[in-house]
């Protein structure tokens, strides 16, 4: 009897501890939509599931959508502006087209239900929006009415990347580590595929008939289209310190790839040789952006690094500028006309002036819902 | 929290993912394998507990005699029973240790399941920071969360809850001696039901992977108990017409 009582007391006493400690492992999510800048307006998804349009000059909110909390869903995709509409895919598994001027919904696909969480940014080509979804399929939708043109067969358990389109072929990488090519016209598999040792959240970057993509196995792959084997894997010696999460970019024969080990690598596209590397303070989650000769990266701690890629670096690159915005960054960012637009994890929008080397006066702007 | 992750959380997480890769990408099999490993590690404690249980079973006739003799004087009964335990070298609280030792493992396992299955992009990104630089671990991502009819990252269903509760009830029933004292018997019966019901309900609100761990752990416990204590113990069908069967009588 006494034994049972003691046992009971201990179990009851420890159970809350178990539950409390379990809270730390709950599945957190807030979305990390980046900003798109078009005609002086920033369009971005917020952590409370809205798309906002902010005037860059006045910092005023032009509109936000949806205005009903019940319709909101996490947003990981950066909005796309095309014609008079803004397109956004949601984690709730819908693609929405919202009017550019007033932020009212023009169409939604599917009309009801969900196609599975959308994490990778959709792509618009020739009045068609291509969306990769967590149901493992790629969808092609008409941009005007949101009608389904085609959907691919399931390619994997999940697709968390953006499709890459080259001529009449669509390439997509999968979370389980495959790359497939599909007909842009019909969505049929064209028969080629590539399998890596681990999964991809990195979208394929195509440059001169080659695909460059980073993987969870801590290698960056260069793949000849049509070939099942990689041309090279980077690093050659031993794997990088962590995953290649972000998509690489390629310019003038050089692949620029950020890694979760906090390094930015410049790699010869032809040879796979390391040209230089740069050690940032923290993980690099967002893809680099090239603005003329200026290469811009952000790390997770919120530092923006700017490099002049025309400079002859040795093994280690030196940043032209290192500007801290003081907030963590996981979202893709936009860079144009000497300004870098960043949505921080604090749900604020920052504008960084590269010339001045600081956050522009008057920013950040909170993206939180006004109460 | 960092110390916890360094010493317990991350090792369990990485071993679980490595096991998943070794076992053909089955996260369910990885949880079963980890359960076996945990039971092997805690085997010395389990064995001590089972030996203690066996000794308690053998002492039942004497305990019942004491209950008859001092049934009305609870204080004296407790004193005599403690004396009896002491003479036999049995610690009545010995059965608690394997359970207590498993608490941190449950916590680590819960965290590992949630982190390893990484259902959101944020969680997948956070997972990258916790993995060792073993190829076997990094190549296993993303994990397949489906096992049998279960989605191991989602809450358990009623079938799993019944299995968790049922196996736990069987394991407890094998060791729980009936008592002649009606009050004690009623408390024992309540405890016998309460724990399985509690864990059954917990497995409805926790990820199915944790429920799978509890169920497999109980099954291993039943098997070990069967072989060490030599049979099904007090798990016997009770005749509605006869008296409560008591081992040793």
Image (cartoon, helix red, strand yellow):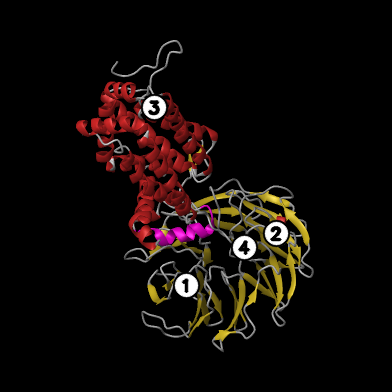
Depicted A205 relative to depicted A227: above or below: below
> Residue B188: horizontal and vertical position, in percent?
42, 29
Q: CA distance from mark 2 to mark 3?
A: 65 Å
> Front-most of A357 and B24?
A357
* Secondary element type, mark 2: strand
Quarter of the image for residue B241 reads top left
Are callouts 2 and 4 both on one chain? yes
Mark 1 crowd level (few <14, some 14–19, many ≥20, 10 Å Cα): many
| N-terminal label among 2 and 1 | 2
Q: Earlier in the sequence, mark 4 or mark 1?
A: 4
Residue A201 colored magenta?
no
Q: Identify the element where label 3 is drawn.
A: helix
> Do dots 2 and 3 share one subunit?
no
Q: Residues within 10 Å of mark 3 (few under 14, many from 20)?
A: many
Q: Nearer the viewer, mark 4 or mark 1?
A: 4
The C terminus of chain A - image quarter: bottom right
List the residue tagged with mark 3. B173
Front one among B2 and A257: B2
Q: For the residue carrying disc 4, how many other residues have a C-alpha within 10 Å: few (<14), some (14-19), or many (20+)?
A: many
């Amino acid at each position: 009897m006494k034994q049972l009582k003691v046992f009971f007391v201990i179990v009851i006493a420890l159970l809350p501890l178990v539950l409390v400690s379990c809270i730390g492992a709950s599945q957190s999510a807030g979305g990390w939509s980046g900003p798109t800048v078009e005609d002086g307006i920033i369009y971005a998804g917020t952590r409370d599931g809205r798309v906002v349009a902010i005037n860059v000059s006045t910092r005023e909110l032009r509109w936000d959508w949806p205005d009903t909390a019940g319709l909101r869903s996490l947003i990981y995709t950066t909005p796309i502006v095309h014609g008079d509409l803004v397109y956004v895919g949601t984690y709730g598994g819908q693609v929405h087209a919202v009017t550019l001027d007033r932020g009212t919904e023009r169409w939604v696909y599917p009309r009801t239900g969900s196609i599975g969480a959308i994490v990778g940014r959709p792509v618009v080509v020739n009045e068609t929006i291509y969306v990769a979804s967590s149901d493992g399929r790629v969808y092609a939708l008409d941009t005007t009415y949101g009608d389904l043109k085609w959907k691919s067969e399931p390619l994997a358990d999940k697709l968390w990347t953006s499709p890459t389109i080259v001529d009449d072929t669509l390439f997509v990488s999968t979370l389980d580590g495959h790359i497939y090519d599909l007909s842009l016209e019909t969505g049929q598999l064209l028969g080629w595929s590539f399998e890596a040792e681990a999964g991809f959240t990195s979208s394929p970057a195509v440059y001169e008939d080659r695909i460059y993509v980073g993987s969870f196995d801590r290698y960056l792959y260069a793949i000849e289209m049509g070939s099942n084997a990689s041309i090279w894997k980077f690093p050659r010696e031993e794997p990088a310190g962590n995953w290649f999460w972000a998509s690489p970019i390629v310019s003038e024969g050089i692949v620029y790839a950020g890694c979760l080990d906090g390094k930015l690598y410049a790699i010869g596209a032809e040879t796979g040789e390391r040209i230089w590397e740069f050690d940032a303070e923290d993980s690099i989650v967002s893809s680099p952006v090239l603005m003329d000769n200026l290469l811009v990266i952000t790390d997770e701690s919120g530092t923006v690094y700017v490099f002049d890629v025309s400079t002859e670096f040795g093994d280690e690159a030196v940043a032209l500028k290192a500007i801290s915005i003081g907030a963590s960054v996981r979202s893709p960012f936009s860079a144009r006309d000497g300004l870098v637009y960043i949505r921080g994890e604090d749900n604020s929008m920052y504008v960084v002036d590269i010339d001045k080397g600081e956050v522009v006066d008057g920013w950040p702007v909170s993206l939180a819902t006004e109460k | 929290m960092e110390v916890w992750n360094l010493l317990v959380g991350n090792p369990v997480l990485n071993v679980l993912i490595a096991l998943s890769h070794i076992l053909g990408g089955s996260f369910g099999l990885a949880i079963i394998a980890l359960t076996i490993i945990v039971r092997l590690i805690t085997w010395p404690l389990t064995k001590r507990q089972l030996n203690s249980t066996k000794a308690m079973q053998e002492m039942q006739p004497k305990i019942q005699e004491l209950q008859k003799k001092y049934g009305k004087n609870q204080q004296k009964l407790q004193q005599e029973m403690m004396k009896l335990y002491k003479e036999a070298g049995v610690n009545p609280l010995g059965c608690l240790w394997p359970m207590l030792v498993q608490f941190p493992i449950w916590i680590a396992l819960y965290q590992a399941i949630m982190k390893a299955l990484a259902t959101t992009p944020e969680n997948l990104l956070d997972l990258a920071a916790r993995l060792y630089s073993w190829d076997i671990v990094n190549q296993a991502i993303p994990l397949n969360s489906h096992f049998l009819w279960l989605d191991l990252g989602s809450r358990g269903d009623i079938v799993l809850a019944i299995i968790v509760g049922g196996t736990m009830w069987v394991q407890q029933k094998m060791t729980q001696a009936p008592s002649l004292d009606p009050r004690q018997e009623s408390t024992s019966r309540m405890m016998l039901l309460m724990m399985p019901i509690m864990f059954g309900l917990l497995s409805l609100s926790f990820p199915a992977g944790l429920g799978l761990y509890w169920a497999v752990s109980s099954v291993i416990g039943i098997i070990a108990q069967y072989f060490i204590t030599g049979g099904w113990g007090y798990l016997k069908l009770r005749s509605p017409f006869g008296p409560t069967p008591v081992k040793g009588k």
